[in-house]
Image: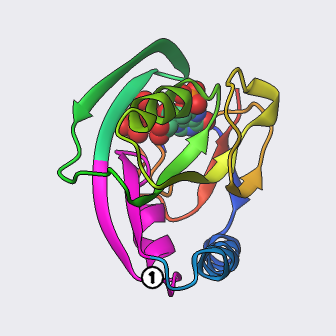
């Protein structure tokens, strides 16, 4: 990678093992209750694909697109880039994020989704940065807690690059 200093934070095997645990936990919690799993694009697309294959409960999927980052900083302005196709009223919604950093994106989405009166609303994020959180809501399922450093790979980008890297890498300043 040109001019980017990185180190591996989570390998393919570590990611896969933790995602299987998350899938088991989610399957136990929902049982036979049908879930609408909603991926927050673009970052969640790889995690979402692996996560749903480790869930045994009946499920449907949809996606919502949001964007708020320029480089490694949140602009604080969450923009919807692609809307849901489904009606979520009266359904069990599981929002899937790649990362919760400041939490501004997930807070915005939870407030938006609540207006449509889902039966239940939970959040699953592969990564979370507790030291950076400024949000009011809690996260129901977290893969790994990490420090404030910017990370890339496994769907996560830096200015739209590096999403295809199969591991999670930490960017070293
Ligand atoms: O907790 P926050 O500080 O709001 O950051 C988390 C959000 O930022 C990233 O999305 P981004 O806006 O970069 O869009 P992308 O998923 O298309 O990369 C990430 O995928 C989360 O949705
Ligand atoms: O650390 C991060 N990496 C990639 N995208 C992000 N969006 C919020 N935080 C991050
Ligand atoms: Mg991004």
Please name the residue shown 58% across and 44% down the image: 99
Q: State the SS at label 1.
A: loop
In the image, residue 6 lies at what x, y percent?
65, 44
Q: Is residue 57 inside the magenta stretch?
A: yes
Please name the residue shown 69% across and 76% down the image: 25
Report whether residue 152 is seen. no
Is 13 on the left or on the right of 155, as rendered? right
Comparing 4 with 158, the one in front is 158
Is 110 on the left or on the right of 19, as rendered? left
Q: Is residue 48 above or below residue 153?
A: below
Q: Is residue 142 above or below residue 130?
A: below
Instruction: Return the residue at label 1.
Output: 53
Report whether residue 22 is seen. yes
Instruction: Identify the image's colour scheme: rainbow, by chain, secondary structure or one colour.
Output: rainbow
Q: What is the span of residues highlighted in magenta in the rendered image?
A: 34-63
Q: Is residue 154 above or below residue 80?
A: below
Q: The C terminus appears in which quarter of the rendering?
A: top right
Q: Is residue 26 inside the magenta stretch?
A: no
Comparing 115 with 72, the one in front is 115
Please name the residue shown 39% across and 54% down the image: 39
Is 107 on the left or on the right of 22, as rendered? left
Total count of labels: 1
In the image, residue 63 lies at what x, y percent?
29, 52
Please name the residue shown 42% across and 75% down the image: 34
In the image, residue 145 lies at what x, y percent?
78, 49
In the image, residue 76 lies at what x, y percent?
50, 12
Comparing 172 with 92, the one in front is 92
Q: Is residue 6 above or below residue 33?
A: above
């Amino acid at each position: 990678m040109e001019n980017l200093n990185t180190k591996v934070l989570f390998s393919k095997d570590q990611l896969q093992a933790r995602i299987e645990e998350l899938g088991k936990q989610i399957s136990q919690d929902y049982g036979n209750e049908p879930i609408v799993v909603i991926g927050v694009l673009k970052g969640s697309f790889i995690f979402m694909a692996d996560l749903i294959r480790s869930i045994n409960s009946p499920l449907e999927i949809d996606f919502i697109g949001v964007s708020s980052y320029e480089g490694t900083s949140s602009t604080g302005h969450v923009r919807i880039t692609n809307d849901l196709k489904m009606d979520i009223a009266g359904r069990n919604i599981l929002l899937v994020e790649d990362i919760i950093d400041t939490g501004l994106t997930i807070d915005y989405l939870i407030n938006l989704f609540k207006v449509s009166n889902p039966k239940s609303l939970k959040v699953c994020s592969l990564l979370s940065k507790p030291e950076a959180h400024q949000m009011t809501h809690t996260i129901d399922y977290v893969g790994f807690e990490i420090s404030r450093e910017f990370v890339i790979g496994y769907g996560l980008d830096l200015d739209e690059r590096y999403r295809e890297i199969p591991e999670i890498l930490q960017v070293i300043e």
